[in-house]
Image: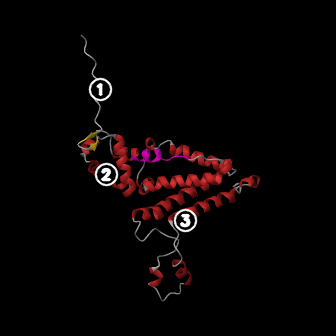
Amino acid sequence: MSEKPSKPRRRPATRKGRPTLTRELIAERALHLAGAEGFPAVTMRRLAEELGVTVRALYNYVADRQEVVDLAARLLLAQWELPELDPERWEDSVRAYCAQLRGLYRRYPRALLVSLDERVRPTGVHPNRLANPEAFLGLLRGIGLTPHDALRVHSELGLKLFAFTLLVDHPTDRAPDGPGPLDAAPVPAAWPAAHPELHLPYLSEAVHLPKPTPDELFDYLVDTLVLSIRERLPATHAGVRRQKP
């Protein structure tokens, strides 16, 4: 009687109450660590401590730290969902695109500095990193912007959202009951008060104005981007300067 072929053994989902180590789990933990503390915090020793394994165990799944960075960066971009972009409702589309990016960046704020802290290899670039900007540029070109103007708007969006995430959302989310994010005031209120010898009527007025909420600041940021796009629309596309309700 021939013996039945043995089935391959499946790795258990957990071991001693912890999830079994996988490349996916390594990438996930690395991304969360980078999001909270930045990619410099993602060392093999720190990652092993976070996962409750030895450094040697990590090397059974990844070749080196560079591969960990690539996997984490790819996982971040894999979560970048693209909303519907409709040239007929381009303002709504721009706002939805910005809101989606804000949500993604807000989950992993310090990981946004990956381009400054690391060099991600092409294998770490998820297709979303190409397809989504392509779609946004296509929206801008579809409503009549020139290639140069579309690129300027895309760059403006990136700069504004990066700064907003790191200077407004991240401080607010990290310490909801703390002093708060960088607000609309040009300087902290304590600074003019510490220099009574200076005549600072406009600064003194500005620091005592009501502080906008992060959501109000974000809406203002997107409003300025929409205005920037409107100003670049050609006269032949005047019909899309203002979107129909």
Residue beneath disc 1: 8
- Determine the residue located farthest toward the front in the rendered image: 245
Q: Which residues are magenta?
A: 72-82
Residue type at tag 3: Glu
According to the image, label 2 marks what residue? Answer: 43
Query: What distance separates the C-alpha of mark 2 from that of mark 1?
Result: 33 Å
Bin the neighbour count of mark 3 within 10 Å (Cα to Cα): few under 14, some 14-19, many 20 and up. few
Residue 113, picture quadrant: bottom left
Image position of 170 (left or right of 216): left
What residue sits 51% from the left and 67% below the top?
Answer: 213
Residue 165 position, x and y percent, is 48, 60
Farthest bottom residue in view: 197
- Which one is earlier in the sequence, the residue at label 3 or at label 1? 1
Q: Nearer the viewer, residue 176 or 186?
A: 176
Q: Earlier in the sequence, mark 3 or mark 2?
A: 2
Disc 3 marks which residue?
216
- Amino acid type of the residue that numbered disc 2 sits on in the rendered structure: Thr
Drawn side of residue 174 relative to residue 240, left or right: left
